[in-house]
Structure formats: structure tokens, C-alpha cells
């Protein structure tokens, strides 16, 4: 009797973990917003070609089009820290944005855009060419659309195709602590072959961590040059 009563007493005092988790998930799903961060406005440009940069002013999490908070995020950590979560219209996996990263996006309107893989390959080739000029070595195009230093990812990108208009955006890790990614993001369900099951901390790096302490404005200028060359190659100059 005593043991039974004690168990009942304890069960009434102990929190229901499932209830807490479900409550967190509901709260998290209610917080997910439609993507409207500054780089999306490049789509409003009247030009066929456009490029914009955005330096995040805070921490954000961006879900890919097919991602859900439940399967992609450590929701309790996200809720506890008050991180704002958005869902973008493009594919790919979820990402963390921070003030130590650089976000850049491009709009390309054309009658014949080609296959997405070919566009990613062309963009990465231009980026590698110009970023190498800043002194960053051992840059590679990996997976479908990543850039890496050696076997570690420094840039992820995705695109959205709507009729004759393509929206491309990317995030480059200049100097963010990789542990931040592990804190908020679960291991993705899908991953590029070169990841080989590695955890975030072993898979992602930053330009600074790899020993390339390069001014952000120089990096930005090199990316802008890469896209200007790309736009010229596609048949027009960026306005």
C-alpha cells in the first residue's frame, strides 16, 4: 500500500515528458514563418539578373521546402533560445544563419535556364575561380551544390524555379562556431555522398577555421565578380 501510494504521489509530481515534448512541438510549428528575409526581395527586381547580399543581424533557422521542425530541429533548444524559424521556397536541408555568415541570393530570368545541376555546377565554378583569388585554397564543388575546403563544407545553396525565373540563394560560413549548428539541427535525413555520415561538427567548417583570415568585403567583392561573370556568360549584364 505504501509503495503504491508513493508511486502515485511521485507520478503526480513528475512532469509528463511526452506532454512537454508535444507542447514544445506545437509551439515550434506555430512559430515557423513564411520566408521573407531580406534576400528574397531580389525577386522583385525588374532586371533579368539580380544579386543581393545580406548579413544576418541575429540567429535564424531556415527549413528547406520539404523539411519539418519535428524532424529537422532540436525543438526544445530552439524554443528555449527564442530562435526565429522560417521555411524557404527552395529545396535542400535546414540551415542556421548567424551574423558571422554571409547570405547571398541571385535572380536569373531566361527562356532556357538549363537543368538545375548544370546551373549549380556553373555557379560553383565561377565562385571557386574568384574566391581562390582572395587566397582561399583547396576549394571544391561537392555534392549537388556545396562548396568545400578539402572535404569540409563551407557553403550550402539551393534554388527555386518558377516558370522562366530562377531564385538561387546560398550561405557561406565565414567564422561561425560549428557547435551552434549541432545545437539546433538534427542530422539530416538526406546527405551528399561526400558527407559519409559525419556529424555536423566533423562535416562543416568555416573560412577562418581553415586559416584564411580574409576581410568580409573582399569575399563579398569576389562573389559579386563571380556572378557578374556568370550573368555575362548567360547573355546579359547585371543592371
Image: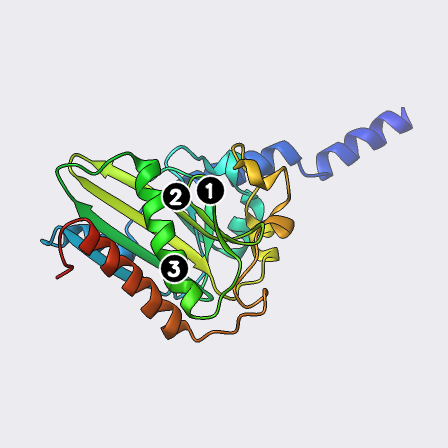
The Cα atoms of the two marked residues, 2 and 1, are separated by: 7 Å
List the residue tagged with mark 3. 129
Image marks 2 and 1: residues in contact by CB distance under 8 Å: yes
Residue 14 vertical placement versus 47 (above, below): above
Q: Residues within 10 Å of mark 2 (few under 14, many from 20)?
A: some
Q: Element at badge 2?
A: loop
The Cα atoms of the two marked residues, 3 and 2, are separated by: 37 Å
* Left or right of residue 63, residue 185 in this image: right
Where residue 184 sits: x, y (%)? 55, 49
Q: Element at badge 3?
A: helix
List the residue tagged with mark 2. 32
Which of the colour schemes (rainbow, by chain, secondary structure, one colour) is used? rainbow
Q: Front-most of 171 and 58?
A: 171
The Cα atoms of the two marked residues, 3 and 1, are separated by: 41 Å
Where residue 221 sits: x, y (%)? 32, 70
Q: Which mark is residue 28?
A: 1
Residue 168 vertical placement versus 206 (above, below): above
Where residue 193 sits: x, y (%)? 55, 35
Where residue 6 sits: x, y (%)? 84, 32
Q: Residues within 10 Å of mark 3 (few under 14, many from 20)?
A: some
Nearer the observer: mark 3 or 2; the answer is 3
Which residue lies at the image location 47% right of the left edge and 38% below the top edge?
Answer: 69
Which residue lies at the image location 47% right of the left edge and 74% below the top edge?
Answer: 214
Image marks 3 and 2: residues in contact by CB distance under 8 Å: no
Q: Element at badge 1?
A: helix
If the image is split into quadrants, where does the N terminus sit?
Answer: top right
Amino acid at each position: 500500500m505504501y509503495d503504491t501510494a508513493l508511486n502515485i504521489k511521485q507520478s503526480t509530481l513528475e512532469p509528463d515528458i511526452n506532454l512537454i515534448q508535444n507542447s514544445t512541438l506545437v509551439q515550434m510549428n506555430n512559430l515557423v514563418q513564411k520566408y521573407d528575409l531580406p534576400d528574397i526581395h531580389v525577386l522583385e527586381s525588374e532586371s533579368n539578373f539580380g544579386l543581393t547580399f545580406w548579413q544576418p543581424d541575429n540567429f535564424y533557422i531556415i527549413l528547406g521546402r520539404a523539411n519539418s521542425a519535428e524532424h529537422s530541429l532540436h525543438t526544445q533548444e530552439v524554443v528555449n533560445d527564442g530562435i526565429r524559424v522560417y521555411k524557404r521556397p527552395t529545396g535542400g536541408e535546414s540551415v542556421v544563419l548567424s551574423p558571422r555568415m554571409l547570405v547571398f541570393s541571385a535572380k536569373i530570368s531566361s527562356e532556357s535556364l538549363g537543368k538545375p545541376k548544370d546551373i549549380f555546377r556553373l555557379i560553383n565554378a565561377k565562385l571557386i575561380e574568384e574566391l581562390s583569388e582572395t587566397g582561399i585554397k583547396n576549394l571544391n564543388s561537392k555534392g549537388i551544390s556545396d562548396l568545400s575546403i578539402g572535404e569540409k563544407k563551407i557553403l550550402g545553396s539551393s534554388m527555386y524555379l518558377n516558370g522562366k525565373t530562377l531564385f538561387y540563394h546560398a550561405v557561406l560560413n565565414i567564422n561561425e562556431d560549428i557547435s551552434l549548428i549541432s545545437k539546433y539541427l538534427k542530422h539530416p535525413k538526406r546527405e551528399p555522398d561526400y558527407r559519409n555520415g559525419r556529424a555536423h561538427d566533423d562535416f562543416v567548417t568555416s573560412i577562418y577555421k581553415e586559416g584564411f583570415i580574409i576581410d568580409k568585403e573582399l569575399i563579398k567583392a569576389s562573389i559579386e565578380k563571380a556572378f557578374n561573370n556568370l550573368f555575362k556568360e548567360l547573355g546579359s549584364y547585371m543592371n
